[in-house]
């Protein structure tokens, strides 16, 4: 139930005692905000004459959950409640399941000094053009190395662990000084012929951030990064006519896809120098908390926590990248879906929260339209208000692009008169580059 409030009854100078929403569940005035004439003028300009109070105390989550998700068609959501035929056990999968059942022999919780304790964060004005070019080049080179490593493993090369480790260390070092630029480049769109390599690298980058946000130490973050980079290697053994199919998978197609975690295990067990957790992640990244995933329909207590973490990165990256059968979701829609899946008991809510801590509801690097009609890019988060990030303003209120030297930053938490009105797609703004605003 919602309590309705007429805008005409709001008095300038009063303090909002609760979050106030539109009829469509859009947060308009936050709890504790001093209502001003400008607030009322903006509401009047938008023809909003009624506000609503949510009955739940968890307003931010309810704002997301209460919305209609009619356009969200993730495979995990569609097939997740139907279950799958169980695939034949292998010796390595039986060994993993046995160790996970014992639990105490599989450490997967944070320990020691969290990696995030030592991080610093560059701001847009502190990044030179040369620095941004270096980051772009590092990402491009890492994607090429990812392609080389995955293809080499499929061909039987078992001596790739040092190359894998170097990729993870490079991005972990960038994280320590500039996690926001790392999250930004993870939004790079793939070339049409290299989706799997692109996906693997971006899931790795996102997993490094989630792991650090959650409190894992440096060694654990590096291990999680390795598993994330290799989590989908078994897909390279799935026939190309299925991998590159332009229509949605049939039941028969999806049964073939379900085999890739076990196929990946057979590749990874031969590779020397990998952390043991790499196989847990590859094997279980597509399992679900409520036992509706694949390949073995294992429930929460039998899923390694590293795999649960990479699940979050895997789902977000898959949604926010284009697929042959659908365009990319907006980053905001992908973040909404994570919350919905956590609420439905499909993925671990604690890792979704860790994702949102560093990414926010409007993920870093995404485009938004502000209530003053300026186009902006999200460049930083506010931990106490994930719906009010820091943005770089790219245009004036008429939509004219600002000169690069005139782009400026706004903290929406400190600018009560401004809010995000709409999330936007990059596809409509071809002249905006990945590094603009940073």
Image: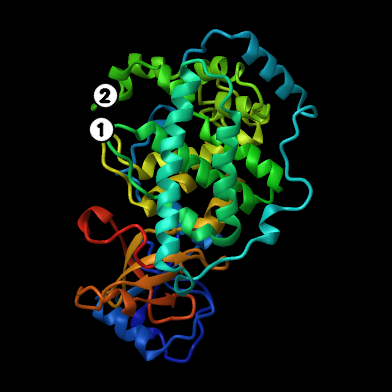
- Give the x, y percent position of residue 225: 58, 39
**Residue under circle 2?**
245
Which x, y percent locates residue 179? 54, 58
Q: Residues within 10 Å of mark 1 (few under 14, many from 20)?
A: few
Tell me what residue is drawn at x 27 percent, y 35 percent. Answer: 192
Q: Which residue is mark 1?
A: 325
Of pointers 2 and 1, the one earlier in the residue sequence: 2
- Residue shown at 59% from the left, 49% from the top: 172
Would you say 164 lies left or right of 236 here? right
Which of the two residues, 343 or 160, is positioned nearer the viewer here? 160
Q: How many marks?
A: 2
Callouts 2 and 1 close, C-beta under 8 Å: yes
Asked if residue 123 can be seen in this view, the reply is yes
Is residue 82 visible in this depiction of the protein?
no
- Work out whether 434 lies above or below 318: below
Q: Residue at x 64, y 61 (%)?
A: 119
């Amino acid at each position: 139930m919602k309590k309705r409030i007429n805008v005409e009854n709001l008095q300038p100078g009063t303090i909002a005692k609760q979050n106030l929403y539109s009829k469509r569940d859009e947060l308009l005035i936050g709890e504790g905000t001093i209502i001003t004439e400008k607030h009322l003028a903006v509401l009047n300009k938008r023809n909003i004459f009624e506000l609503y109070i949510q009955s739940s105390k968890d307003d931010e989550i309810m704002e997301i959950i209460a919305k209609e998700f009619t356009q969200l068609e993730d495979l995990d959501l569609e097939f997740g409640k139907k279950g799958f035929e169980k695939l034949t056990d292998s010796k390595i999968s039986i060994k993993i399941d046995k160790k996970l059942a014992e639990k105490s022999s599989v450490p997967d919780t944070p320990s020691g000094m969290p990696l995030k304790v030592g991080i610093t964060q560059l701001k847009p004005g502190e990044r030179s053009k040369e620095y941004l070019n270096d980051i772009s080049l590092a990402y491009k080179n890492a994607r090429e190395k990812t392609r080389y490593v995955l293809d080499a493993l499929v061909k039987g090369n078992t001596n790739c662990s040092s190359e894998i480790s170097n990729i993870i260390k490079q991005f972990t070092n960038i994280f320590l000084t500039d996690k926001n630029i790392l999250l930004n480049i993870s939004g790079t769109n793939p070339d049409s012929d290299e989706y799997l390599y692109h996906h693997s690298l971006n899931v790795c980058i996102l997993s490094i951030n989630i792991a650090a946000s959650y409190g894992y130490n440096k060694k654990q973050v590096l291990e999680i990064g390795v598993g994330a980079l290799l989590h989908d290697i078994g897909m390279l053994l799935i026939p190309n006519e299925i991998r590159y199919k332009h229509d949605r998978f049939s039941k028969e197609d999806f049964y073939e896809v379900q085999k890739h975690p076990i196929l990946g295990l057979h590749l990874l067990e031969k590779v020397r120098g990998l952390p043991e957790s790499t196989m847990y992640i590859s094997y279980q990244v597509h399992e679900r908390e409520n036992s509706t995933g694949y390949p073995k329909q294992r429930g929460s207590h039998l899923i390694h926590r590293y795999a649960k973490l990479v699940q979050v990165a895997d789902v977000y990256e898959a949604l926010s990248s284009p697929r042959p059968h659908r365009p990319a979701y907006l980053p905001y829609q992908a973040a909404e879906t994570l919350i919905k899946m956590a609420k439905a008991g499909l993925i671990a809510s604690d890792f979704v929260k860790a994702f949102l801590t560093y990414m926010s509801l409007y993920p870093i690097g995404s485009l938004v339209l502000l209530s003053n009609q300026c186009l902006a890019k999200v460049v930083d988060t506010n931990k106490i208000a994930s719906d009010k990030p820091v943005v770089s303003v790219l245009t004036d209120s008429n939509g004219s692009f600002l000169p690069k030297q005139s782009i400026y930053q706004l903290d929406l938490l400190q600018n009560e008169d401004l809010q995000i009105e709409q999330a936007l797609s990059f596809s409509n703004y071809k002249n905006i580059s990945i590094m603009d605003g940073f």
